[in-house]
């Protein structure tokens, strides 16, 4: 078994949709980034890649590559899943948390979980998504940005 940890943060700006876990959430601001800036999926991808000893998303999907401009992070997540499968890894489980003061995310959590599981071709029972606030503290508490953390357990892999 191998464990990985991921973290991502993006600034909230006007004029962009807010996408978290592959779900577009009604809000007056969205996340700034080269792709759809889905911090939740980015943190999960980094956790998966870390567990596999395969670097990070910047190495695999650089923001200098125009192929990834505006791309859905779920597409990138599916590519990570395919690469893990090719190396003989299977996902044991994923646990992730979104840190945002607003908007309230509870109504969207199950759909986020389902979309990420589908992108990886795994059971949604292997994916857990939570949300928390920072009680108004820091950049997430003031509404300047949203952060996410992810942890992943992989089984199998080279040499097993």
Image (cartoon, rainbow, N blue to C red):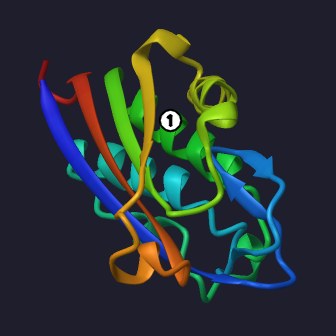
Badge 1: how crowded within 10 Å, few (<14), some, or many (20+)?
many
Q: Is residue 141 left or right of residue 54?
A: right
Left or right: 49 as drawn, with respect to 121: left
Q: Quadrant of residue 35?
A: bottom right
User: How many dots with numbers?
Assistant: 1
Q: Is residue 31 above or below residue 39?
A: below
| Quarter containing the N terminus | top left
Q: Is residue 29 visible?
A: yes
Q: Nearer the viewer, residue 114 or 106?
A: 106
Disc 1 designates what residue? Answer: 81
Q: In the rendered image of this protein, does residue 124 appear above or below residue 7?
A: above
Residue at 33% over, 22% down? 93
**Residue 2 place in picture, x, y as percent:** 14, 33
Q: Secondary structure at mark 1?
A: helix
Taking the image as shown, residue 57 lies to the left or right of residue 35, namely: left
Q: Nearer the viewer, residue 99 or 154?
A: 99
In the figure, residue 4 lies in which quadrant? Answer: top left
Q: Quadrant of the C terminus?
A: top left
Instruction: Give residue 143's position: percent from left, percent from top.
Output: 55, 78
Closest to the observer, 127 or 25? 25
Residue occupying image coordinates x 69% and y 32%: 107
- The image shows residue 28 at horizontal and vertical percentages of 82, 72
At 80% across and 63% down in the image, what residue appears?
Answer: 27
Residue 88 visible somewhere in the drawing = no
Q: Is residue 119 above or below residue 133?
A: above
């Amino acid at each position: 078994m191998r464990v990985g940890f991921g973290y991502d943060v993006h600034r909230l700006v006007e004029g962009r949709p807010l996408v978290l876990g592959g779900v577009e959430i009604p809000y007056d601001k969205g996340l700034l980034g080269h792709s759809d800036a889905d911090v939740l999926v980015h943190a999960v991808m980094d956790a998966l890649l870390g567990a596999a000893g395969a670097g990070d998303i910047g190495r695999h999907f650089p923001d200098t590559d125009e192929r990834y401009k505006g791309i859905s992070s779920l597409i990138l997540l599916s590519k990570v899943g395919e690469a893990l499968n090719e190396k003989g890894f299977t996902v044991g489980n994923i646990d992730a948390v979104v840190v945002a003061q607003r908007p309230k995310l509870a109504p969207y959590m199950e759909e986020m979980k389902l979309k990420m599981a589908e992108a990886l071709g795994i059971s949604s029972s292997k994916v857990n998504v939570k949300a928390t606030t920072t009680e108004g503290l820091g950049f997430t508490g003031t509404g300047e940005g949203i952060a996410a953390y992810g942890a992943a357990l992989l089984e199998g892999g080279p040499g097993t």
